[in-house]
Image: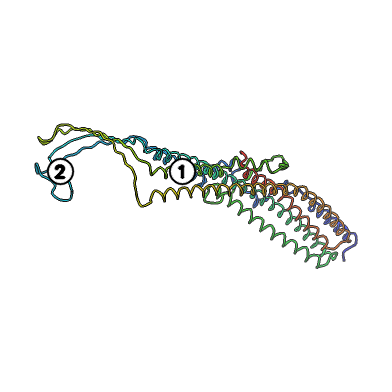
Amino acid sequence: MIRPTGCISLLLAVTCSFAKAQAPADPGNAPASTQTAPSGPPLTLAQAEATAIKNNPQITIGRLRALAAQQYVRESRSALLPNAYLSLTAVDSNPGSRLAAGFLNNPILFPRAAEGASVGQLVTDFGRTTNLLSSSQFAAKAEDQNAAATRADILLAVDQAFYNSLDTQALARVAEQTVEARQTLVDKVQALTDAKLKSELDLSFAKVELARAKLLLLESRNNFQAALAGLSAILGYPSEQNFQLVEETTPRTPPAPDVQPLIQQALQQRPEIKALQLEVQSARKFAGAEHDLWRPTVAALGAVGEAPVRDNHIPNWYGAVGVNVNIPVFNGFLYSARAKAADLQTEVDRQKLADLRNTIARDVRVAWQDTNRAYERLSLTQQLRRQAILALELAQARYNLGLGSIVEFTQAELQKTEADIADADATYQYRLTQMVLAFTIAAPK
């Protein structure tokens, strides 16, 4: 037989310990579990961005393509420079023999050994080569902008992966607190049930909520590990790295009041638009070069040499200069087709540029709206969390006094957990929307 005073003492002791465990805690200041907080090297956002720039293959590919485009410029410029060759020739033949078949001419073959040099220089092709050179230069500049766009894409992916990892880590901490609180509730109800002060139904409800909390913890830890794996991959690591993420505290600034200046900034600064503008100019120059195929080509050639070993009929040196003019007359409409195709491709690039402008304007508007919604959500989730804490305290007091049921109390606990999760998620989601908006307007980092 348990005495009444003993029951009261037991109830007070369990209630006090339970109240301490159920005291509302800030998820951001809660101690992290060893399974949630990795023991690897610390990593800040700036370090993550620098690592991605150094290791990510996509950034390296963009730089290599830009370097390759510079070589195409040199290739196009080579047509404007002279071509020089050195030649060494030795011939042994039947003296005075002649080629008797295979040619319309009938040259004489003499035994000889000679060396010489020849130089060729394009005089003019009336603008075709200079247009090709300009086209390759614009294409090289476009590749530079494409490399900058790739770099911005990777940095945005790094920022998103970094804050997604912080977000999932914070949610895992909330889940850990929930498990601890509900384990304490189970222990309390178990003690009260053993003392015949609570029913088995209350204990069953408490254990069900504890099982749900453990499932939430398992899922949140799995999401955190998946986020770390994604962050490691975008940083260029083949395997998952257990970073200790260092969150930089920055003041929350409200979004811009008007979206139109942001759209104008994006249309002026986005590297994708700059790249397409340069590609349009490159296509226009190339089309001009294709039209110039119908113009004449004037080239000069000079040759000089010496024959120390020779037949008596051959002088000991030779030299000649000449000019060649090539005038196209008819080639089966090849040049006309090439010029028309180049004009059509130029128009295709212009339409791509117009479509990209519309797409970027839409992306900026959507990102700005998402940022406003996330900013308003911050205050709402904080208010929701405060109300959930108050409701939990009242439900706890009613349950301790025997005025409320276990269903009422567990429902208040569930609402508190959901409010903690929403509040923790809202902070990181607002930062993510800010990063996406900064990317869409090409804001300097």
The residue lying furthest to the right in this view is 4
Residue located at (49% from left, 40% from top) = 141
How is the structure coloured here?
Answer: rainbow
The residue lying furthest to the front in this view is 329
Placement of 378 over or under 301, stated as above or below: below
Residue located at (87% from left, 66% from top) = 1
Task: State the residue in front, 235 or 31.
Answer: 235
In the shown orientation, is residue 391 left or right of residue 166? right
Residue located at (77% from left, 57% from top) = 184
Secondary structure type for disc 1 = helix
In the shown orientation, is residue 63 left or right of residue 397? left
Q: Residues within 10 Å of mark 1 (few under 14, many from 20)?
A: some
In the shown orientation, is residue 310 left or right of residue 225? left
Tell me residue 381's x, y (percent): 77, 50
Q: How many numbered marks does the figure carry? A: 2
Q: Quadrant of the C terminus?
A: top right
Placement of 138 over or under 380, stated as above or below: above
Tell me residue 244's x, y (percent): 62, 45
Task: State the residue in front, 311 or 34.
Answer: 311
**Of the residues tagged 1 and 2, which is closer to the observer?**
2
Q: Residues within 10 Å of mark 2 (few under 14, many from 20)?
A: few
Read off the residue under disc 2: 107
The residue lying furthest to the bottom in this view is 200
Tell me residue 316's x, y (percent): 15, 31
Placement of 239 over or under 247, stated as above or below: below
Read off the residue under disc 1: 64
Amino acid identity at mark 1: Leu
